[in-house]
Amino acid sequence: MNNRKMLIAMTSMTLMFGLGYGFKGEAYAEKSVTQSAEETAIKAEVKYIAQGIDEAAKAKTDQEQKKFKNLKDLQQKALSEKLNPGEIRYVYINDKEYQAYAKGSPTTGAYYSLSFNTYNEYVEKYAAGNTSMPLQLQEPPEGYIFFMAIVSPYMTKKEQDKIYYQVIAEGKASDKKIYVKKLQEKRTAINIIYNMTTEKNGKRGVLAIAAEPAGPKDTTVESEPANAQSQKLKVSGQEVVYTPIDKMEYKSVAWMNPKTRVNYIIRETGGHLTKEDLIALAGQIIEASA
């Protein structure tokens, strides 16, 4: 078992897909195998100018990175200091010039976690003694191999967003270049992660099984909202919600145990399991947690 510091990005990420364009002379097949000396010279000049622009941009980036290296080092130092059980730590770089340059958020964070490298280790050292949030499987998912189990502090997305903006406001109001906020959280979440043993269509699927506390007023699983494709089903007397998202090669089964007030979510991305396979996995967990 390892006590690990898990780095977390505290903002949502925007995925940007760039389209690369070649030079006009390279965008289509040449009409002739031979080129005039003038055409060759023009083409060489274009490439030279483009190369110069790329080198200038890289030099500027390198200069900026060196300029803010001290701030990044201080941020990393604050993140790397020993974390206490249940601790969530946020570190904000309070520098307007850095914020204007920064690729990403000036706020990062870390949290204390327990990680287990084998399923037996997870069961023996954690799950066997955790009756408040049971999460065990009788049989491993077919075609998958255990990767890791992680036990970490739990916060809802709404709570994370609130704290994130609070850290920014407090950091800007402080007189410190590096602002650190430490929180202590008693709630925990469990995540068991499996990887597919072989690739499917060039991809290796991932299966994640989570247990997390439900809020006092929750009637559904807050972290796995239903959509138009969702279906309500009964498994061993428990109502579950099956949700596929075809374009993302994603499917999930989620439910809340009304007696223990624990949410369970099984999520697969890019894998081979069928709806029936996920329902069978849900049945295992429901029976083990009854």
Image: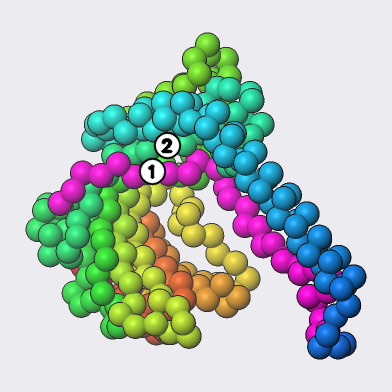
Q: Which residues are magenta?
A: 1-30
Q: CA distance from mark 1 to mark 2?
A: 6 Å
Tell me if mark 1 has few (under 14), some (14-19) or many (20+) residues whose alpha carbon lies within 10 angstroms of its own.
some
Residue closer to the observer: 288 or 91: 91
At a point 38% along the width and 43% down the height, the residue shown is 7
Residue at mark 1: 7
Q: Position of residue 91 (x, y in %)?
A: 45, 29
Say if residue 122 shows up in the picture.
Answer: yes
Q: Residue at x 30, y 80 (%)?
A: 197
Query: What is the x, y in percent for residue 223?
Result: 48, 54
Q: Which residue does the image show at 48% across and 85% down from the upper left?
A: 201
Q: Quadrant of residue 20?
A: bottom right
Percent coordinates x, y for residue 45 in the rendering:
81, 60
Disc 2 on helix, strand or loop?
A: strand
Relative depth, front residue between 44 and 274 = 44
Mark 1 and 2 residues: CB-CB less than 8 Å, in contact? yes
Mark earlier in primary sequence (1, 2): 1
Q: Secondary structure at mark 1?
A: strand
